[in-house]
Amino acid sequence: MKPSDERQFRDFVLAQLPGLRRSAYLLCGDRHGADDLASIAVGKLFRAWSRVRAVEQPTAYLRKMLVNAWLDERRRPWRRERSTAVLPESVAPPGPDVAQRAELFALLARLPARRRAVLVLRFLDDLSVEQTAEILGCSTGTVKTHTARGLADLRGLLAASASDPNRGDLS
Amino acid sequence: MSETDARRLFHDATAESVLGAPTVDIDAVIGRERRRATRRRIIAAGGAVAAVIAITAAVSTVVSHGPATGDPPATAPAPTPATPAPRATRPEREDFALRALAEHFPGAVRQPVEYAHWDGRVNVEAQVPGPPAATVFVEALRVDASPEHPCYGVRPPTCVELSQPDGSVVTVSHLSEPGSSGVIAIHLRTNGTHVQVGAVAAGSTAPYSDEVMVRAATDPRFTAMAPGTGG
């Protein structure tokens, strides 16, 4: 890669990294896993940079790499949950609304992978239905269906949260 | 909940104060990718040299001894690897893979798993009753431009590379996480075929030896099941 191309790559990645990490975090639900995913996507982007920089929307291309990296990671057998005698130590990430986040990630974890990806791409990355369909390799109808059902799931979460005084306020 | 509410919820949940400082090191990623590219070039060059040597040896044998006639050779020829039927569908290739997998891991029973097949890869996962009871899996795909470095993405990074006679490389990685252990062998062929065989089980010991995993990963039938290999 020529130095000028590498500079361009660095500038692009630096600009995209915050958004990329946020998307990765919502997809995998783990801060460290999010950085791993972002790193994998950036590596894939570097390999394809000569091709990607010429396309109209390199950002969408990067999102596609991220989603694919996440799907690849989550299907590995050792990534799945399994019961163990020893519980790993876990500390909730700092920040406001810990209970709210816990509720949200618990809900997202229950969703099928594609629906979760649709919600992240549509409502965190602000992509259109068409862009989301392009990234996920499915029809716009499928994206609309997943969007509607995902919103209904979130609505159900809100209702459950509102009716349970011990839970965090999501509204 | 409206779309606006969903956007606010997602943005609040991923605020910078939640995520903290990034640990993604762009320089490290670029360095790693450069090393990976170098390694690919070396592997490809090694494969080409091996092919030239093999052709040269074959030609010189024919010239000095003439074509083989009459008696069979002293050693039995290598068995022709079975391949999936031409134009086999992905389910057919997966059935083929399961049969081969069960030969390496006796008793393996297929376990249906939701996979995204967007990249055309063929993969099969199975449960072996044991002992040792384990989850085993195999996947094969063609990597046209940029194969993943087999040692990357596995934690802890205990990864060994084993050069093969044909110029290809097999890597064996060991995984250890609380309550489970595993071993993964990846055969990165010079023709771009990428076969990964893994086994994971409860406990602190890998369920199978490196030898078993390498034998499975280099099984030509798994290479043949990858889409686009003509199998």
Image (cartoon, coloured by chain):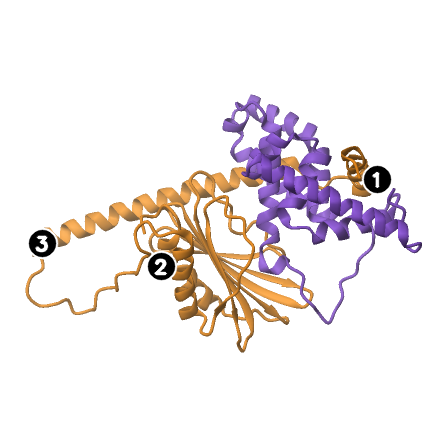
Q: Which residue is most to the bottom?
A: B131
What color does chain A have in the rendering? purple
The amino acid on which the numbered mark 2 sits, given as a three-letter code, is Arg
Residue B64 is labelled as 3
**Closer-to-camera residue (B209/B105):** B105
Q: Percent x, y for residue B164?
A: 38, 56
Q: Label 1 neighbourhood size at 10 Å, few (<14), some (14-19), many (20+)?
A: few
Q: Do we see residue B33 in this rendering?
A: yes
- Amino acid carrying mark 3 in the image: Ser
Q: Upstream in the sequence, badge 1 or badge 2?
A: 1
C-alpha distance separating marks 3 and 2: 34 Å
Residue A92 appears at what percent x and percent y?
83, 52
- For disc 2, the marked residue is B221
- Expressed as whole percent of the image width and height from the top left, the position of residue B116 reads 54, 48
Give residue B65's position: percent from left, percent from top: 8, 57
Point 69% across, 48% down: residue: A28
State which chain disc 2 sits on.
B
Under circle 1, the secondary element is helix
Cα separation, mark 3 vs mark 1, equals 76 Å
Q: Colour of chain B?
A: orange
Q: Nearer the viewer, mark 3 or mark 2?
A: 2
Residue under the image location 55 percent in, 37 percent down: A139
SS for callout 2: helix
Label 3: which secondary element? helix
Residues behind callouts 1 and 2 on a single chain: yes
Q: Is residue B24 visible?
A: no
Disc 1 residue type (three-letter): Ser
Which label belongs to residue B17?
1
